[in-house]
Amino acid sequence: MRDNMLAAVAASAGLEALDAVRVDALGKQGRITQLLKTLGGMSPEQRQVEGPRIQSLREAVTTAIADRKAALEAAALDARLASETLDMTLPADAPLSGTIHPVSQVMDELAEIFADLGFAVATGPEMETDWHNFSALNIPETHPARAMHDTFYLEGAQALKHLGLADERETISVLRTHTSPVQIRTMLSQKPPIRIIAPGRTYRSDSDATHTPMFHQVEGLVIDKGITLGHLKWTLETFLKAFFERDDIVLRLRPSYFPFTEPSAEIDVGYSLVKGKRVIGGSGDDKDGGWLEVLGSGMVHPKVIEACGLDPAEWQGFAFGCGIDRLAMLKYGMDDLRAFFDGDIRWLKHYGFSA
Ligand code: PHE
């Protein structure tokens, strides 16, 4: 039986076959296990002879199985090492490099262009108080403009407000719907003259090909003495010429309404159709042209200047605001705003934003 079992161990070609041999010898119903059970029915003399014999058989088979198992495992490893060779001479895949996102790129361009005109960059929080986002901008609670903003309200703050526990100047209660609250924060924290732009994220509950719930705006604010609509027009014209890198930029100031500016003007730029695509430049009244609205603007409302603790008789200014994503779309010929926030590197490469 010993030779027979040891031969079976040696002959097992794989781990499964070896396990079958183990079960046959040492398992619950195994032959050696059965032999051990016979010891109980033997006379003491017989047991003294048979006991050590069966024990040594068990040890021999157990050791043989363990050795064979180790040998089979080593062989399996050798086989794997032999088949999974690495060719160290192959060239490596080129690493996928990131790129500057068009929105970041446009923000950098804006900062550069306006720096040349003497504007600093200001920032403000994306979670705002009602007061900074609306009231101080001459949009009281009952003003219809509030409804137009599709505001995201912060739940806890709304509850506090209903209980009369919220200090409207202190309690953060909305995601800012525009960058205009940065006008307020700047006027409160800096002495005029002020010349700033404020690029950043803004939020409105809106989503389609040209609207995303999060989008980017840039605000501009100038507060000084003797500022007129002429300064506003010159500044925006200079900015748009630099941004679109063309001298034939034509602006149209269309009377409009914003609660925080008076008078207010929407700024349209002329475009021309080139191979069916709108390209900024030229008069919108040209045969193949049209007008695109790109900015909201106006002279800062005296009530806003007053809300910031300044005397409107002494200080005047202008402000403007526009969508950065929209500027990027116009400059780089992109047509779906949602793609801006998908993070698809193929899309970035398509528009030439690859490193
Ligand atoms: N805040 C306005 C908007 O989001 C834009 C604007 C800014 C208009 C400053 C006038 C002056 O639509």
Image (tube, rainbow, N blue to C red):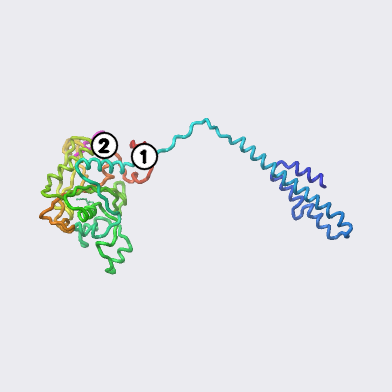
Q: Compare residues 293 and 229 and report the one nearer the observer.
A: 229
Q: Position of residue 292 (x, y in %)?
A: 21, 43
Identify residue for label 2: 277
Q: Is residue 126 left or right of residue 317?
A: right
Q: What range of the chain is rendered magenta?
A: 270-280
The disc labelled 2 sits on which kind of residue?
Answer: Lys
Q: Position of residue 329 (x, y in %)?
A: 28, 41
Q: Position of residue 284 (x, y in %)?
A: 18, 39
Residue 339 quadrant: top left
Q: Compare residues 139 and 57 and report the one nearer the observer.
A: 57
Mark nearest the camera among 2 and 1 is 1
Q: Residue at x 48, y 33 (%)?
A: 92
Q: Is residue 93 above or below residue 312?
A: above
Q: Is residue 257 left or right of residue 172?
A: left
Q: Is residue 185 left or right of residue 38?
A: left
Identify residue for label 1: 99
Q: In the rendered structure, does residue 277 fall within the stretch colored magenta?
A: yes
Q: Residue at x 28, y 51 (%)?
A: 202
Disc 1 crowd rating (10 Å Cα; few below 14, some 14-19, many 20+) is some
Question: What is the magenta segment's predominant secondary structure?
Answer: strand
> Could you give the CA–CA distance between mark 2 and mark 1, rounded to whole angstroms?
26 Å
